[in-house]
Amino acid sequence: MEDSRGIWTMTADVDLLLRLAGSGVDWLALDAQHGALDRAALHAAGRALTSAHHPFLVRVPAVDPAWIGAALDAGAHGVVVPSVTGAGDAERAALASRYPPLGDRSWGPWSPMWGVDAPDTATANELVRCWAMVETVGALDEVEQIAATPGVDGLFVGPLDLALALGTTVDALLDDTTPGGPLARVVAAADRQGILVGAFAGSPAVAHRLRAHGIGFLAVTTDAGVVAAGVRAVLDELGPRQA
Ligand code: 3PY
Ligand code: MG
């Protein structure tokens, strides 16, 4: 099982992103679906993180080739594609992630604008990671075909939406260790194809529970989570308020 630890970020603040990226995690995942990241913020964040050699992924807003291309043009090492509803969506995401002949990504990396050479197309195709999110009933139903889709490099579980879609709770989803259970099915599909499997955890406690399922590529916390935890730790260290 991969042991890779990331932070999920909603902020568009470049200074905070740089600080988080330099704090010992393996990667950041910048959230353009539910976070504050628009195209302008993506440009600023991409320039800063690329210049600082910090790996980052972008969770794009939808199965959207334009956003997938922009995220990769900004220097993202990979894209996390949400709301995939089946193998057709996974194929569209995979094609958008790679240049011809493997896909239909258009040439236009942004790094030359800030003086950094872009990798050639073969190298970019080799390095990029396209993660298909499994968080809908359709994606779970077709998870074996999604895992087998050329150019899909990993399955990324969204426990919050998957639980919603299945009419259950995140706790019940994580507690389900039956062999045919949703998480076991995702892990088995990834393992069969030799691709990665990751998930949004959001906290170390949930990360431990996901690891027990064999999912090790994890967003273990969030930007808001670490800021709040940091403030709590400081106040705890200070002790009770003086009368
Ligand atoms: C989910 O859990 O549904 C996610 O998309 C994580 O942000
Ligand atoms: Mg989701």
Image (cartoon, helix red, strand yellow):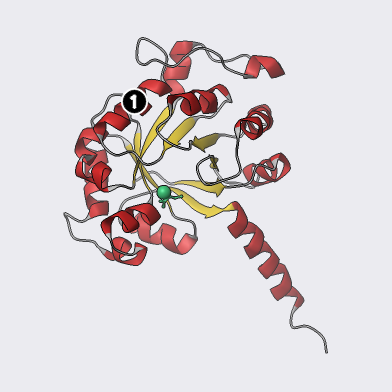
Q: Residue furthest right?
A: 243
Identify which amino acid the numbered label 1 is placed on. Answer: Arg
Residue 197 % position (x, y): 34, 42
Which quarter of the rendering shows the C terminus? bottom right
Disc 1: which residue? 92
**Residue, x 29% and y 63% (percent of image)?**
168
Against 186, residue 221 (above or below) is below
Considering depth in this image, is 221 or 159 the residue closer to the camera? 159
Q: Residue furthest bottom?
A: 243
Q: What secondary structure is found at the residue carrying circle 1? A: helix
Q: Is mark 1 within 8 Å of ligand 2?
A: no
**Residue, x 37% and y 28% (percent of image)?**
93
**Residue, x 69% and y 43% (percent of image)?**
13
Q: Is residue 199 left or right of residue 32?
A: left
Q: Is residue 135 left or right of residue 23?
A: left
Q: Residue furthest left?
A: 180
Residue 18 % position (x, y): 68, 40
